[in-house]
Image (cartoon, rainbow, N blue to C red):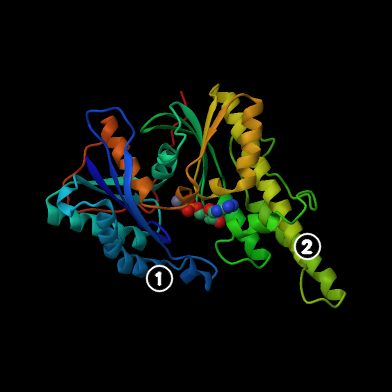
Amino acid sequence: MLILGLESSCDETGVALVAFDPGSPGLPQLRAQALHTQIDMHKAYGGVVPELASRDHIRRVVPLVRQVMEKGGRALADLDVVAYTAGPGLAGALLVGAGAAQALALALGKPVLPVHHLEGHLLSPFLSADPPAFPFVALLVSGGHTQLMQVQGVGQYALLGETIDDAAGEAFDKCAKLIGLDYPGGAALSRLAQQGRPDAYAFPRPLLHSGDLDFSFAGLKTSVATQVQRLLQAVQDGGAPGLSEAQRADVAASTQAAIVEVLVRKSLSALKRTGLRRLVVAGGVGANRELRAQLDAACARMQARVHYPELALCTDNGTMIAMAAAMRLQAGIQQPAAAGAFEVMPRWPFAVAAPA
Ligand code: KG4
Ligand code: ZN
């Protein structure tokens, strides 16, 4: 079966072609993909501007579909299903991908399959060179979500804990902004952190000892803001215009240390609590090198395996959407639907059930 996947929930337009053999248990394979990121466009505004995002998705989606079909060496008529991100995300942005997928499917006489964006992230490690096996604990860390989940199989996701305020990626981005880094600052902050001292400032580790698996990152941002303000006051009193590179690097390293420590400790608690020995990390923050290094070391100590998506598949992309659709079809848990009337779900809970 040949699945086309469209992603447009936020500031990336992603399209991909994934194939699987319904008669074989092998994992679906990526045939071709293309991605356009709007990051440069939103940078000037310090964050995603929803209206601009929607308009840019409109400009990009059809050329990207053409590009992917050409790269994959297949015709549109060869498609079996058109999958798309139905939520959660920006309503206008989601409507573009959903509308394009529905129109294409309707014109081709093919069915559609709406996909949950977070399920895309969650299943993206199955396309890596070292794919996981079920069951596992998943740490989903993106710009909009921070969740720990117990995953028994495709479509079987139980929520273990989640953030009660900001997401980890949001914390990275907000703190990055405080030290003058462009949106989205997560990757830039982590690069700057390499030159800094992680113990320069003792930023809070919220909910570290809460006894549950929830997260909270809003207080960290406040604490970093206060520290930056204090440093700024001191350097300005001394006649300097702003923080030195070394000071910014220290703030970056200390911020990263606080976020990473909480994510690592809670992930280990989730493994202990569930008795599972396999951790899967997904979402944009999963690209963070310090997080990967600390998780690798901690999991090795408790003889647990840890899996990550390929770096390029950590942030939003069409591949994970086509992959999630393919895995749901292959597992027989979702049938494609006839194209036609549709809706998107800007707020779409992912897994709310407590584990059995
Ligand atoms: O999964 P994603 O592309 O978008 C959402 O679905 O939200 O994640 C984007 C988030 C942003 O907050 C970005 O700053 C963060 O992932 N991110 C990173 C790194 N690369 C991306 N955060 C920390 N370190 C990184 N290397
Ligand atoms: Zn995402």
Q: Which residue is mark 1?
A: 52
Which one is in front, 174 or 244? 244
Pick whichever, 82 or 2, lies toward us. 2
Q: Is residue 219 left or right of residue 288?
A: right
Which of disc 1 and disc 2 is earlier in sequence?
1
Q: Give the CA separation, mark 2 to mark 1.
A: 36 Å
Residue depth check, mark 2 versus mark 1: number of the one nearer the observer: 2
Q: Residue at x 45, y 37 (%)?
A: 129
| Label of residue 136 in the image | none
From the image, which quarter does the N terminus lie in? Answer: top left
Where is residue 309? Give x, y as percent: 47, 42
Some atom of ligand 1 lies within 8 Å of the CB belonging to the residue at label 1: no
Image position, residue 300 (x, y; %): 63, 28
What residue does disc 2 label?
246
Horizontal arrangement in the rendering, residue 162 relative to residue 246 (left or right): left
- Tell me how many marks there are: 2
Residue 218, position in %: x, y? 63, 53
